[in-house]
Image (spheres, rainbow, N blue to C red):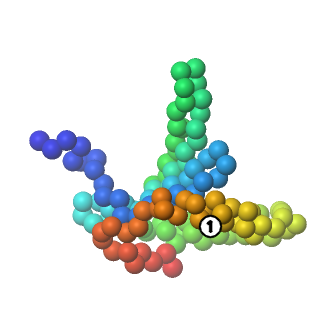
Amino acid sequence: MEENKDNERTEIFSERVRAGKRTYFFDVKATRSNDYYLTITESKRRYKDDGFFYEKHKIFLYKEDFNKFMKAFTETVDHVKEELMPEVDFDAFDEDNEEQDENHKSERVGVTSGNSDLNWD
């Protein structure tokens, strides 16, 4: 009997975003039937008496919800930027982190198998 066969999923693509004390992972995975889905994981390093551990929260996003998710996410971020915090230069955050991002490019994982033309529109 193969170990963990039912729980095994093929990872197709992964992108990591470091954000202060948090790290976000955007992972495209495939089921055994070659159906694609996205997991979004927030990971936070936490300390306890005998060292540290990573607290993780995960969202599974299925292909039939991609467009609805992106629309709601974009509208929400735009509302914060334009209505609640118009005085904040959000592009400055990106510029401040460009050097850090360049240092971590080598850690990204590219498409290894399957369909790389996932369309979110």
Q: Which residue is drawn at 30% across and 69% down?
A: 113
Which residue appears farthest toward the top when viewing the image? 49
Question: Visible in this render: residue 76?
Answer: no
Q: Which residue is drawn at 54% across and 38% down?
A: 55
In-image side of 87 versus 73 (left or right): right
Q: Residue at x 51, y 79 (%)?
A: 121
Residue situated in front as seen by the camera: 87 or 62? 87
Q: How crowded is mark 1: few (under 14 residues within 10 Å), some or many (20 or more)?
A: few
Q: Which residue is drawn at 37% across and 69% down?
A: 111
Question: Image quarter for residue 94?
Answer: bottom right
Which residue appears farthest toward the right when viewing the image? 87
In-image side of 108 versus 82 (left or right): left
Name the residue that disc number 1 marks.
Answer: 72
Which residue appears farthest toward the left when viewing the image? 1
Residue situated in front as seen by the camera: 49 or 30? 49
Q: Which amino acid does label 1 sit on?
A: Ala
How many numbered tags mark residues here?
Answer: 1
Quarter occupied by the N terminus: top left
In-image side of 77 versus 61 (left or right): right
Instruction: From the top left corner, tell me how far across and down residue 62 is, in percent.
Output: 42, 62
Residue situated in front as seen by the camera: 54 or 68? 54
Question: Image quarter for residue 95?
Answer: bottom right
Question: Visible in this render: residue 28?
Answer: yes
In-image side of 55 versus 112 (left or right): right
Instruction: From the top left corner, tell me how far across and down residue 32 is, in percent.
Output: 24, 60
Where disc 1 sits, the SS reads helix
